[in-house]
């Protein structure tokens, strides 16, 4: 078991979940969201932001945690 990798994985999972929750309750917190919407369009910019800051970190966190537990 590699504790550094497990810790990094847990950090990524918490980061992704936190950004998702903050996006629901306090969208003004994300200053990069509006420029992304202006550049890519309303829906596409929002989905790119959700993927980049919520889905991808959670996915990487799960992968890192599994790899850390396996050794």
Image (cartoon, rainbow, N blue to C red):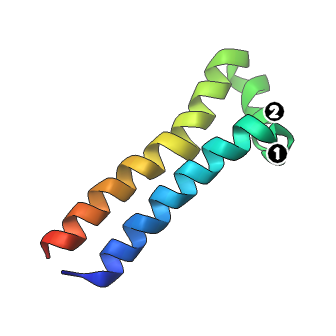
Q: How many labels does the image show?
A: 2
Pick the residue in front: 17 or 45. 17
Q: Is residue 70 left or right of residue 37?
A: left
Q: Which residue lies furthest to the right in this view?
A: 28
Q: Up-down: is 15 above or below 10? A: above
Asked if labels 2 and 1 touch by Cβ distance under 8 angstroms, the answer is yes
The quarter holding residue 7 reads bottom left
- Would you place residue 70 above or below residue 50 in this image? below
The residue singled out by tag 2 in the image is: 34
Which image quarter holds the N terminus? Answer: bottom left
Count residues near mark 2 (Cα–Cα under 10 Å), then give few for <14, some for 14-19, many for 20+. Answer: some
Distance of mark 1 from mark 2, alpha carbons? 6 Å
Residue 57 place in picture, x, y as percent: 46, 51
Label 2, secondary structure: give it: helix
Residue at position x 32%, y 75% from top?
Answer: 5
Q: Where is residue 68 in the image (x, y as percent from the top left)?
A: 23, 72
Identify the disc placed on residue 10.
Answer: none
Residue 69: image quadrant is bottom left
**Which residue has dot 1 on it?**
31
Looking at the image, which residue is at 79% across and 34% down? 35
Position in image of residue 66 (x %, y %): 22, 62
Give the side of residue 47 with respect to residue 40, left or right: left
Residue 38's quadrant in the figure?
Answer: top right
Q: Residue at x 66, y 27 (%)?
A: 46
Label 1 secondary element: loop
In the displayed image of the protein, which residue is found farthest to the left? 70
When the figure is inspected, residue 13 is found, relative to residue 48, above or below; the finding is below
**Camera-side residue of 52 and 62:** 62
Q: Residue 9 in the image: x percent, y percent? A: 38, 65
């Amino acid at each position: 078991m590699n504790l550094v990798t497990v810790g990094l994985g847990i950090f990524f999972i918490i980061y992704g979940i936190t950004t998702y929750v903050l996006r629901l309750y306090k969208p003004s917190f994300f200053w990069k969201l509006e420029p992304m919407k202006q550049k890519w369009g309303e829906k596409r910019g929002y989905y790119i932001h959700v993927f980049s800051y919520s889905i991808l970190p959670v996915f990487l966190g799960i992968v890192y945690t599994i790899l850390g537990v396996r050794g």
